[in-house]
Amino acid sequence: MPAFADKLAAAAERNRSLLCVGLDPDPARMPVAGVAEFNRAIIDATSDLVCAYKPNLAFYEALGPAGLDALRATLDAIPDWVPVIADAKRGDLDNSSAGYARALFDVWDFDAATFHPYMGRDSLAPFLARPERGILVLCRTSNPSAREFQDLRVTPMAGGDTLPMYEYVAMTAVKWNDNGNVGLVVGATYPDELERVRDLCPDMPILIPGVGTQEGALERSVAVGVDERGRNAIVNASRGVIYAGDDPTTYPDAARNAAQRLRDTINRVLEDRGLGWNA
């Protein structure tokens, strides 16, 4: 199978898009009862507008066995050429992580997943050893309380001046990237920090959540989050797309319109910087 980075780049070029749609089904908000039906309609309406999809596993696990069945049906509905990122936020002792790696990559066949760096390299070793899969490390998350830990000043193990923990995570992720499969997660709610992370990691893919309901700075995040070619940013929107409409007959059209607007806005930023898809 192609490496995650290659599959992501191919999908982005094919759809001229850096938009990722988060498939986070909430039965209380869905205009139809079936999770698989809901997701399938969203996918059918948006698969030519995205570079990836990102199911958050919590929404499926919360529904028990039926939710896991819906997750399988959802994955089956996504075109093979579109990469799928598991928003799983894993990271544990090495033997537990080996089990998580088998689950995410062998059982569910996700192309990439999100991970906590807090326990260090050995907790991620089973994932890092999968060069064909993407390892997206939480660096500067989009939630308001991220500052409680991620802004703490730390001293690098090699010594030197202190720096914010999120910067140290970014620098450490570079060291972990022996197989070229590591990326980062940095929220659009913190565009200044995103710009700094991109400076530290010029070539890594960065997953950028928080541009929708969390009201992150979309245009600035795109401008500072892409690499020098205008690529390698995965701009995620979940609720703002999948719940754009609440009519059972027209919600797929509303989702498509919302995704189209986001993709067009992203592309205008790229074009203004001379980094459009024909550049």
Image (cartoon, helix red, strand yellow):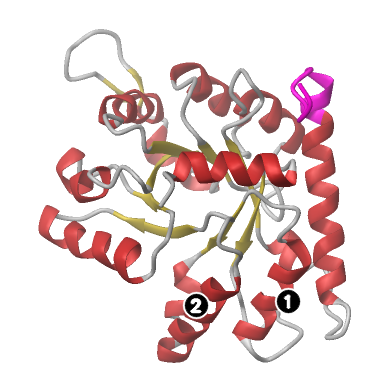
Q: Quadrant of the C terminus?
A: top right
Tell me the amino acid under the disc marked 2: Leu
**Which residue: 42% across, 61% down?**
110
Q: Where are the magenta residues, as a range? A: 269-279
Residue 163 occupies quadrant: top left
Q: x and y percent of residue 174 in the render?
A: 33, 25
Instruction: Count the marks.
Output: 2
Asked if 95 appears above or below 140 in the picture, the reply is below
**Which residue: 59% across, 69% down?**
24
Asked if 236 appears above or below 139 in the picture, the reply is below
Main SS of the magenta segment?
loop
Residue 111 occupies quadrant: bottom left
Return the residue at label 2. 71
Q: Which mark is residue 73?
A: none
Q: x and y percent of residue 83 in the render?
A: 53, 54
**Which residue: 19% across, 39% down?**
121
Left or right of 34: which side holds 270?
Answer: right
State the residue lying farthest toward the left: 95
Near mark 2 (Cα within 10 A), the count class, few <14, some 14-19 or many ≥20, is many
**Res 30 seen here:** yes
Tell me the amino acid under the disc marked 1: Ala
Near mark 1 (Cα within 10 A), the count class, few <14, some 14-19 or many ≥20, is some
Which residue is more in the foreground, 50 or 116?
Answer: 50
Asked if 85 appears above or below 28 in the picture, the reply is above
> Which element is circle 1 on?
helix
**Residue 278 covered by magenta stretch:** yes
Left or right of 272: which side holds 81?
Answer: left
Q: Which mark is residue 41?
A: 1
State the residue lying farthest toward the front: 1
Q: Earlier in the sequence, mark 2 or mark 1?
A: 1
